[in-house]
Image (cartoon, coloured by chain):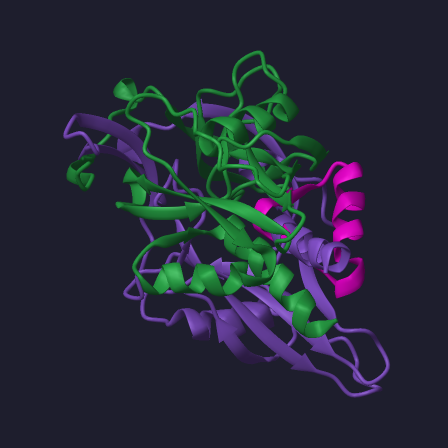
Chain colours: A green, B purple
Amino acid sequence: MPSEPKVTSIDALPTSEAKWIEFQKISWTDQIGKPRIWESASRKTRGKSGVDAVAISTIIRHPSRPPSTIIILQYRPPVDAVCVEFPAGLVDENETPSDASTRELHEETGYKGKLRYISPTIVSDPGMSTANMQLATVEVVLGEGDKEPEQVLDDGEFIERVVVPLGELYERLLKYSEEGKLVDARLFHWAAGFHCAKTVL
Amino acid sequence: MPSEPKVTSIDALPTSEAKWIEFQKISWTDQIGKPRIWESASRKTRGKSGVDAVAISTIIRHPSRPPSTIIILQYRPPVDAVCVEFPAGLVDENETPSDASTRELHEETGYKGKLRYISPTIVSDPGMSTANMQLATVEVVLGEGDKEPEQVLDDGEFIERVVVPLGELYERLLKYSEEGKLVDARLFHWAAGFHCAKTVL
């Protein structure tokens, strides 16, 4: 029976010990020619594709259920909470972001789908880090009696997947938030855009 | 005449020099009780609200134009490119995120609006940083002959604002991306959710 993960201590990370991320001191010249400094964080894991990560907006089509998507719940040490996110992951060294999308969706949720679209490279938090990503749209077509597939998780990976009708996603995220879970900003923005279209159009 | 901003050098940032961000070495116990380490970046500027930043999804209502939103274009040193984002900013030390939303919208775009909604706290990139934010919805009601208001920018701030009909936002972001600008992942997700609702519903 898995127990509750928890943070036991937080210390300053010396530059020499950092394996996954690094700090950059960026010297730049601004629009009036003035030299300035910006501080930024980077992932050290970026591979040949030039893209750190992918996230997957899945559309599940089913003969008798409304169009749905899949979200995942997993504990994230930086914010010491269970986060609610689109399935996502880092792109491997020699992998394309497109291949990473269907691989990560399969591993984290068990579902196999067809990549319908992948976004241009977008930046996750450009005031603070170099982190970038692409957002994939993957379609999963189910038959009436299809069983929920098995996840393909690594040892030590604990990821809960939840299928949510698209029309209920926004309210579901607000409910998770009330329960103390932290919703990923990108997923929340996707749901807020969807919700806005329903109310404005 | 402002010139093109550019990065002149990138160096490793020693922990002792960092003023705006810091690195954390997080010791945590996972779901099977195993002690583990996670590396994370944090902003040092978080104030009393506990929220680093706000972004603003504006809805502009006009008697004879379609409902529109405002996006901003600004150079971001971490990614050495012009980024396309929702208006956004850090929450001041003693400010509420709600107050920061209308203040930042006014400063960056000149528009004054009414806060209609502010999201729960959401996390920007929880695999890599502690950064969090709230997404505000601000309504701006214009009359037929209203002129475009003046921005209230600090010296050395160069921000271009663009009013875009909601129904054209997604295509506009793809176009900016083709031109070499980098779209913020949160704004892109919002537009992708809006676009999905138009096509799926």
**Is residue B177 a member of the stretch shown in magenta?**
yes
Report if residue B15 is visible in the image.
yes
The C terminus of chain B lies in quadrant: bottom right
Please identify the quarter of the rendering in which residue A1 is found. Answer: top left
Observer-nearest residue: B61 or B167? B167
Measuring from the top left, give residue B99's x and y in whole percent: 44, 75
Measuring from the top left, give residue A179's x and y in whole percent: 31, 61
Q: Residue at x 74, y 69 (%)?
A: B68
Please identify the quarter of the rendering in which residue B160 is found. Answer: bottom right
Measuring from the top left, give residue B128's x and y in whole percent: 39, 36
Residue situated furthest front in the rendering = A145
Q: Is residue B120 left or right of residue A133?
A: left
Q: Is residue B119 left or right of residue B66?
A: left
Q: Residue at x 66, y 79 (%)?
A: B140
Q: How many numbered marks appear? A: 0
Q: Residue at x 52, y 62 (%)?
A: A170
Check the image and report above or below for B121 versus A56. below
Check the image and report above or below for B4 versus A170. above
Check the image and report above or below for B56 versus A130. below
Observer-nearest residue: A45 or A104? A104
Please identify the quarter of the rendering in which residue A99 is found. Answer: top right
Observer-nearest residue: A88 or B117? A88
**Is residue A118 a member of the stretch shown in magenta?**
no
Check the image and report above or below for A103 versus B18. above
Q: Residue at x 75, y 71 (%)?
A: A201
Q: Is residue B124 left or right of residue B113?
A: left
What are the residue bounds of the magenta stretch? B158-187
